[in-house]
Image (cartoon, rainbow, N blue to C red):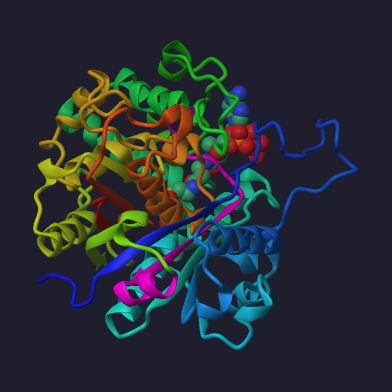
Amino acid sequence: MSLNRRAFVLGGHITPFIGKNHPDFVWKRHPDFGTRENPGLEDYITTAVQGALAATDTPAALVDKAWIGNFVGELFSSQGHLGAAVVGAHPDLLYKPVMRVEGACASGGLAFASALEAIQAGSDVTLVAGAEVQTTASARTGGDYLARASHYKRQRPLDDFTFPALFARRIKAYSEAHGLTEADLAHVSVKAYANANKNPLAHMKAVEMTFERAAGTEGNPKFLSNAEVRDYLKVSDCSQVSDGGAALILVSEAGLAKLGKTPADAIEVLGLGHATGNLFTDGDPLTMATTETAAAQAYAQAGVAADAVQVAEVHDCFTITELLMMEALGFSQPGESAAQVADGRTALAGALPINTGGGLVGFGHPVGATGVKQILEIYRQMKGQCGDYQVGRSLELGLTANMGGDDKTAVVGVFANR
Ligand code: CAA
């Protein structure tokens, strides 16, 4: 069933995603240490919201409702109640209805889904933000915070780095079932870093990842303690612990008119799927059934099949996740995704470019911002705004897949540029 009311993404703003290994990230050996601080959650929310309003010529007074995706502001920044933080970004947002949405790493996608429902219910101009700061704690403490997206009581003991361990378990299962090698995963990582090296906003814009480094362990340790899975995952397979924010404007046809815009200024939402798995049970490690379900809904609503997609942003919290996503989204048959990455099909110049700005591995993964950033990346690719990593042909159909936990919350969107 198609949407009752047409909905359009008008663009928005992505802040730089930064953290360890980014040249601007202040840490104890940075020359600015002691004289400059890294931006905080408040800064990312403010910059993203103000940037989105400015980029789309949207007067804040015309915003009907707003949402913000954030996972654990309370833990990394001792700050919750972030709907009210969005209001702090502009005086004309005062007393608007704003709400924070949480679904682990899919918080941004859920914020977008909420805005789309509001458009269906009669809103005309909505604001969708996402932000996370994670560098206020060590990677190990952060691993414990992020483990709240798993079933903490049962899965936290797997490893101090619970999520890396959960996905190492998937790598192990996939290797046993399909003969996946370290070289296969290295191709995914090398593509992510190569794309990020072309993207000025990317966390890993200045870090080179050679195939030799990604396929080996020199400067690329296997860091898990869990003996059963430690051999399967290296640092190069992981998304980054990043800080950042993103915000976009989603409008109805009437909203376009109110802002003096036309569909040509925007991309249209053709379909959005949202599915949720059971937190308390393990799924099949070889598939992403929740994402597959959300994708089926999105394709059905959009009236398109997987082979119509021309560019995609998929949730690559780990290299294996990108491969499993490709299979869940119908881009590859089970066990065949790695070969498609290795032969360049998903590279910038390939037939189906995936994660063109570097994905979560290269662009970075400030959890609550990720789902919003993915939609903006598709907008920017379809509108030719990606600079050095612009795909060199016109793009009419794009897809985003944002995922929370170990495939427990999934939001998949299909977008058209016409
Ligand atoms: N040899 C052996 N071990 C080493 C090592 C070496 N040369 N270098 C580091 N290590 C080990 C150490 O045990 C170290 O821990 P301690 O320093 O506390 O002993 C550990 O690796 C981490 O080292 P660093 O602190 O130097 O790590 P880092 O800052 O470079 O971070 C990373 C690397 C741990 C992989 C980090 O980037 C990371 O945790 N990434 C994943 C983030 C993540 O899980 N995000 C969530 C994704 S899941 C999702 O998206 C869904 C959801 O809903 C949550």
Quarter placement of the N terminus: bottom left
Image coordinates of residue 224 in percent, x first then y, are: 49, 36
Q: Nearer the viewer, residue 16 or 91?
A: 91
Q: Nearer the viewer, residue 304 or 138?
A: 304
Answer above or below: position of 62 versus 69. below
Image coordinates of residue 167 in percent, x first then y, are: 36, 43
**Is residue 367 visible to us here?**
yes
Residue at x-position 38% and y-position 25%? 191
Residue at x-position 86% and y-position 38%? 33
Residue at x-position 55% and y-position 50%? 143
Answer above or below: position of 295 versus 239. below
Image coordinates of residue 106 in percent, x first then y, are: 40, 60
Which quadrant of the figure shows ligand 1?
top right
Answer left or right for 403 relative to 25. Answer: left
Residue lying at the far bottom of the rendered structure: 95
Which span is picked out in magenta? Answer: 236-259
Residue lying at the far front of the rendered structure: 260
Q: Nearer the viewer, residue 386 or 175?
A: 386
